[in-house]
Amino acid sequence: MNSSDPTLLGTVSAVTGASVSVRLVESLSSGLAIIAGHTYRVGQVGSFVRIPQGYQDLYGVVCEVGATAAPQHFERDVVETSRWMRVELAGEAIGARFERGLSQHPNIGDTVHIVTEGDLRRIYGGRGDDQVEIGHLASAENIAVRLSLDNLVTRHSAILGSTGSGKSTTVASLLRSIVKPGGSDRGSPAARILLLDIHGEYASALADVARVYSASPQTNELPLFVPYWALEAGELLDLLVGTLSDNHEIAFTDKIQELKEKRLALKPILGVDPSSLTVDTPIPFSLKQLWYELIDFETTTFTGAQRDVPALVAEGSADKLAPPRYQPHAIGSAGPYLNTAAKGIRRQLNLLRSRLLDRRYDFILHPGPWEPNLKGEIERDLPELLQGWLGHDRQITILDLSSVPSSVLVRLISSILRIVYEALFWSREKTEGGILRPLLVVMEEAHRYLGAGGDSAASDIVKRIAKEGRKYGVGAMLVSQRPAEVDETVLSQCGTLIALRLANPADRSRVKGALPDNLAGLMDLLPVLRTGEAIIAGEAARLPVRCRVTLPSEGYQPRSADPEVTEAWAKRRVAEGYDRMVASWRAQSTRAVANNTVIQRKPIKDSPDDQGGKV
């Protein structure tokens, strides 16, 4: 062993599985080492080490430093007079090729060395492969951190961190690194990323590389429409009328099936065989017509000897949601008589009518050119919808859901994901499908609709994407500030974890449990990470790494910064208009205005002789 080697840290003293106890050499007196003009921190938790094995090198991450890292069976005086490190082995390199996992283990007495910049180039590879540069090592600013784009998308990922830890900035920086605007390096001109923006933070940050759809569009934004008839019948009915008994559900689904058959008979639709039509086939039909025909059946009364003559007073209007009126039924045998075949769904039909009249649900129940008329005819079909979301000339699509009512948010997210996933699933053998042109779905505030043990429609479709999406080219990226509240099944499917600062013990415990590598000691750093600093482990990172994420340039950062309290409170107050506050509240729009129309009346002259005529 050459003690003059500047990269030497110590020797292997014990090996247990992938965990190695290292006894530091006595000559190591400083926490810094200068090698080939570069400064390296020595023995820091989260730093890398190299253990030579002849033609092969093993690489690991320092997870613990101090006397507690010593093997338990060592004598106390030996432990107290020595310095120790515990290293978790993560991969090996033969020549210039690095591979995760181990084919052999080190021996007692093998030397342990600092990982230099040359070693990291060997691990991460050059710029010509699938590596995406996202930042630099927290301990060495001159060493770039790169992730595998292939594994990041296909094996799913999660970005986790407490409020204020830099999640939104990390997401914006990561997406910008993937698409690389301006033509820098290779870039990804055909990238396809769908971002569900719950708080409206990303429109300004990614405006030059994204197309924005919003339920309440502003300048340079497009209206967001989600056609209700593209949903599965069960999911649609849950949105419209809530939970139904089996008999009541059959009443609705039979009528939906009937309306879809009528629409198909009116004009054939490409790809639809009438013999294989189901209630879940995405065929347009009118909700107004559905409501009208069902309420007509429920409220009909009859007269006549055979009780088969409808006692109709007024027809009503399906388009205006006006119900038909019948003579009220009479007690006894005189008639009119009730419809004994009625299903007893008046309450549910009243709720359906209420939903159709509620303007907050227009984006899904009255989807603009995708809203069918009473015959089921539409101006635009699903190809135009998917073309707008997935086929435009920019790499990112942002769906701004900040103005969507919280009561319908989970169902809306479920609807969007189901439409996209089903389309990519069934087109998997076509050039527009996910295999030949994959899709990355970024889900902000994932804990709001992926609760632990949840059985919501959103949770079901995300679980399906997490379990099956890799095979069909659909990748998921979860973003959450409360990983403890995210369903464990979904989180366990995330092959790459980007963990920012987490102070809550329950959140840290969930992250530790989901880690693909044995890095519990490294995760103990989570409470003390700086803003914008993350520990990255999993499929996309060739080695677990503590990374400082590159900040987006000024003007391209998400609208998630903390308010400047001191500066705001130190200013002199100006004139305030609380009518504007209430106007925004009532309009459910942050940009609503309250304008009072004031008409000023002034005297006018009809002629030179008339000096005082007034209007």
Image (cartoon, helix red, strand yellow):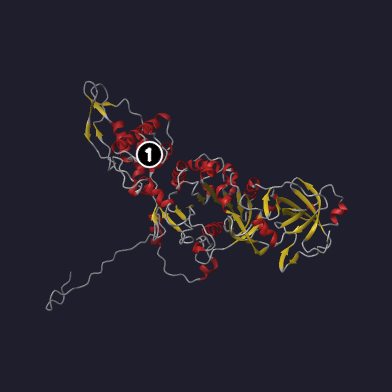
Image coordinates of residue 13 in percent, x first then y, are: 82, 51
Residue 588, picture quadrant: bottom left
Q: Residues within 10 Å of mark 1 (few under 14, many from 20)?
A: few
Q: Is residue 447 left or right of residue 287?
A: right
**Residue drawn 56% across and 40% down?**
453
Query: What kind of element bears circle 1?
Result: loop
Residue 530, picture quadrant: bottom right
What residue type is disc 1 on? Answer: Gly
| Nearer to me, 440 or 510 | 440
- According to the picture, the residue beneath numbered tag 1 turns out to be 271
| Nearer to me, 142 or 124 | 124
Q: Is residue 455 above or below residue 164?
A: above
Q: Is residue 123 above or below residue 570?
A: above
Residue 308, picture quadrant: top left
Let me know if residue 523 appears in the view. Answer: no
The number of discs equals 1
Let me know if residue 228 appears in the view. Answer: yes
Image coordinates of residue 557 in percent, x first then y, are: 51, 62
Q: Is residue 202 left or right of residue 378?
A: right
Q: Is residue 501 left or right of residue 333?
A: right
Image coordinates of residue 197 in percent, x first then y, are: 48, 53
Quadrant in which the N terminus appears: bottom right
What residue occupies the far bottom of the structure in this picture? 608
Quadrant in which the C terminus appears: bottom left
Image coordinates of residue 581 in percent, x first then y, are: 41, 60
